[in-house]
């Protein structure tokens, strides 16, 4: 028994020519999320360090040490994009709600990260405590980018 296959060709409405680019839907390409001011204060250590890094929404930053000496710079586009992704992480809000326990470390560093109106902190005292992951990732990015 032989099978019969029928093919029906019909005109396709709305087809574009192969050399015509498809229209771009502006809603399908989201704009970069607006930034917020980010401040990191690193304090403590055996010498009583206090460094403050402030990153403005445009990616420009100022790093000030305990003597008041300031350095300015600009995050790269990749660093700014990554910072925007990290600061939108909902874990930061959860981490900010956690009370930081007292530490037994004598010369540990304290990190206080403020993103907009949200502040989270931790003491770098391994193995006593593990830093909150989202906060530590932002701290790492800021430290590397402004170092």
Image: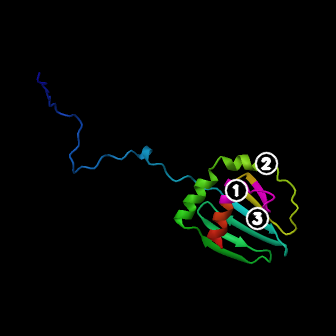
Depth check: give the residue in front, 59 or 4. Answer: 4
Residue count near mark 2 (Cα–Cα under 10 Å), binned few <14, some 14–19, many ≥20: few
- The picture places residue 24, in percent across and down from the top left corner, at 36, 47
From the image, tell me which residue sits under label 2: 98
Instruction: Say which residue label 1 marks.
Output: 135
Quadrant position of residue 57: bottom right
Dot placed on the residue nearer the N-terminal end, 2 or 3: 3
Horizontal and vertical percent position of residue 118 = 73, 51
Pointer 2 or 1: first along the chain: 2
Q: Nearer the viewer, mark 2 or mark 3?
A: 2
Q: Which of the two residues, 107 or 139, is positioned nearer the viewer here?
A: 107
Label of residue 41 in the image:
3
The residues bearing labels 1 and 3 have C-alpha atoms spaced at a distance of 12 Å
Give the left or right position of residue 111, taking residue 58 as reference.
right
- Look at the image and give the residue range highlighted in magenta: 120-137
Number of residues whose C-alpha sits closer than 10 Å to that of mark 3, classed few (under 14), some (14–19) or many (20 or more) = many
Q: Secondary structure at mark 1?
A: helix
Placement of the C terminus among the 4 image quadrants: bottom right
Q: Who is closer to the viewer here, 68 or 41?
A: 41
Query: Which image quadrant for residue 50?
Result: bottom right
Question: Crowding near pointer 1: few (<14 within 10 Å), some, many (20+)?
Answer: many
Query: Could you say which quadrant of the image residue 135 lies in?
Result: bottom right
Is residue 55 at least partly visible in the picture?
A: no
User: Do labels 2 and 3 touch, CB within 8 Å?
Assistant: no
* CA distance for labels 2 and 1: 12 Å
Q: Is residue 23 left or right of residue 60?
A: left
Query: Would you say 64 lies left or right of 75 here?
Result: right
66 in relation to 99, above or below: below
Q: Are marks 2 and 1 in contact (CB under 8 Å)?
A: no
């Amino acid at each position: 028994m032989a099978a019969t296959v029928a093919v029906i060709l019909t005109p396709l409405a709305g087809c574009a020519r192969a050399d015509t680019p498809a229209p771009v839907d502006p809603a399908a390409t989201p704009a970069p999320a607006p930034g917020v001011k980010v401040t990191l204060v690193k304090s403590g250590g055996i010498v009583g360090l206090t460094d403050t890094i402030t990153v403005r929404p445009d990616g420009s930053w100022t790093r000030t040490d305990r003597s008041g000496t300031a350095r300015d710079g600009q995050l790269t586009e990749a660093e700014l994009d990554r910072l925007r992704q990290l600061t939108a992480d909902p874990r930061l809000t959860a981490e900010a709600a956690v009370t930081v326990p007292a530490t037994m470390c004598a010369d540990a560093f304290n990190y206080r990260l403020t993103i907009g109106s949200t502040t989270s902190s931790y003491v770098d005292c391994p193995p006593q405590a593990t830093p909150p992951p989202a906060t530590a990732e932002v701290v790492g990015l800021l430290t590397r980018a402004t170092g």
